[in-house]
Image (tube, rainbow, N blue to C red):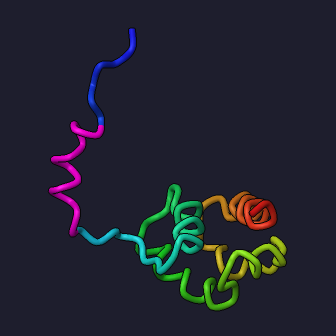
Amino acid sequence: MPSKTDWPKAIQPFLEKYKSTKHPLDYKNIYQLLVIVILSARNSDRNINSLTPKLFEAYPDMNALSRSTEQTLFPFISKVTNFGNKAKWLIEIAKTV
């Protein structure tokens, strides 16, 4: 049976309550948000926020990331859980985009 919940209306109290709350991960654009969301799985926000400035300095956009290799990404993300797979995913996404 389909749900009869009016989701746009139902989430309004949450949107109002948290609208001025800063996101715990630091990002400046959609590219950075995509990268940090992938890296943040099973990691602390503090860890991700500490390593991404150098990563984004080396790879400032999707185009730069698409030209990277797993080995060139490892020094920047090796403190992240499952960094090998995440490097593959990031490069694949960057090349696709």
In percent of the image, x 20 and y 49: which residue is there? 14
Where is residue 53 drawn, in percent x and y?
Answer: 54, 87
**What segment is highlighted magenta in the picture?**
8-20
Residue 64 picture quarter: bottom right
**As drawn, is 83 to the left or to the right of 27?**
right
Q: Nearer the viewer, residue 57 or 85?
A: 57
Q: Is residue 42 above or below residue 68?
A: above
Image quadrant containing the C terminus? bottom right
Residue 35 picture quarter: bottom right
Where is residue 92 drawn, in percent x and y?
Answer: 79, 60
In percent of the image, x 65 and y 85: which residue is there? 60
Where is residue 21 drawn, in percent x and y?
Answer: 23, 68
Image quadrant containing the N terminus? top left
Q: Is residue 52 magenta?
A: no
For the image, the number of numbered tags is 0
In percent of the image, x 53 and y 62: which residue is there? 37
Residue 59 picture quarter: bottom right
**As drawn, is 39 to the left or to the right of 4?**
right
Q: Is residue 17 magenta?
A: yes
**As drawn, is 9 to the left or to the right of 39?**
left
In percent of the image, x 51 and y 76: which residue is there? 29
Where is residue 2 drawn, in percent x and y?
Answer: 39, 14
**As drawn, is 97 to the left or to the right of 36?**
right
Magenta span main SS: helix
